[in-house]
Image: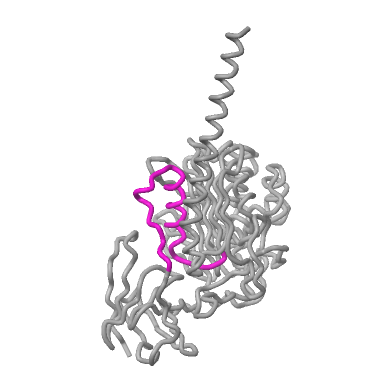
Amino acid sequence: MKVYLKITIVLLTLAYLGCSKKKDENKSQNLEISEYFDNLVANRDFSGVVLIGNSEEILTTYVSGYSDFTNKKEHTNDSKFAVASISKTFTSAGILKLKNEGKIQLSDKVGKYLPEFKYGNKITILHLLRHESGLAEIGFKLLKNDFLNSKMLVSEIEKNPLLFEPGENGSYSNAGFSLLARIIEVVSGLTYEEYLKTKLLSPNGIVNTGDLSTQKMPKKLSKPNFPSALPELVKSIPNVNYSLFLGSGSIYSTASDLWIWGNSIINKSKINIFDEEYPYGWGRDSIAGKFFLNQTGMNEGFVTSLYLFPDENIVIVLLSNIENGMWVDWTKDVAKIYFKDLSKVNYPQRRDVQLEQIINPDQYTGTYKLNSDRIVEIKNNNGNLFLHLNSYYKGHYLTPTENNSFDLRSFTGKITFKNKDTLQWTLPKSWGGNSDIYIRQN
């Protein structure tokens, strides 16, 4: 009896030490994540939620910043975000479910389901999934236009000529995923949102996710923001027209719902993307020697990431309602922190220096050219400078850090005016650190 008692005590002690070690590791990991993102929050570069979880539980959650900067409403675990291109993972899953049910074939021409579509006899469903359709994006000026339903959106897409013959090349296509969403509606007889909720979301216990293309805003939806000037350093983007992003960037969700969604993909619940030639709707990569699937997005004041490590059963989610071009680097660093590859983590620094006003901002304004594909215009708006790339209507705020130098927070890099006729755009070291010189045109 004494021998059994000793064995029991030893086993309980080992179990306790194992649990204690795990708790210490989680505490250390939480501290690393907090230290990493606290500086980004202080810089007004990040505002949102970071989550790490396995198939059984959420291991780490970091929540900071405001869902509404104007009214100082803080983020919570339940904050909702427009998830941008993560929407494509839901759209592709819906298409694959219809295929598995024998209702469509990936080789089918789009015209079989959308007979009115101009290029329907050239483009297949597979072309759309593989970004090989040749479809051009709709004009960005439409971003300010009124609501378009799915039929109207398809009509808008076909107004542009094809960039190339379908299947002969590849080009990332949001328009293609809008067509896939419309095909889901036609085949299922349901709206895009109804189909996702009844066939993919509710069956997996995902209850705080839906579609914004209806322009019906859910409660607790964070307000999107763009980097701006002091004192807030951000500016809310009003009245985003999500109807133009149907299927490609129209989904909203929470960090915990995306954790559940990621686990459902890893565990092949309701849909098995691993049986396909390619995990459509996802990218593939590796970090710290670990293979993972990923989808990331930036759209109208939101940046989002969803990383799935199927061999380790790990899901990483990053959601922020401040547009910033460095968000993918942040997500990769979160993965490196989790997998203890700390030597390769690029810890953000607090932006200690920011000039409150620019002396003679008009000296910088004008058009600068790198080549025919890269033309920037610097505009003065009430003493603040904004960079417009290739005539894009939305300007990117230049954060002044020292005389003649500015951080480009919504894109990436530093803008330096070398003299009155040249502008130097330098990428971050993590992006190669390359510099390009733009020459003033006027």
Q: Does the magenta stretch include residue 330?
A: yes
Relative image position of residue 204 (x, y in whole percent): 68, 42
Q: Does the magenta stretch include residue 85?
A: no
Relative image position of residue 113 (x, y in whole percent): 63, 54
379 vs 271, nearest the viewer: 379
Residue at 47% in and 40% down: 277
Residue at 38% in and 40% down: 289
Left-right relation of 263 to 420: right
Q: What stretch is highlighted in magenta?
A: 321-350
Counting every numbered tag in the picture gives: 0
413 vs 82, nearest the viewer: 413
Left-right relation of 124 to 364: right
Specify the quadrant that holds the N terminus: top right
Residue at 57% in and 45% down: 262
Specify the quadrant that holds the C terminus: bottom left
- Color scheme of the displayed model: one colour
Relative image position of residue 87 (x, y in whole percent): 58, 56
The correct choice, above or below, for 98 with respect to 318 in the image is above
The correct choice, above or below, for 9 with respect to 250 in the image is above
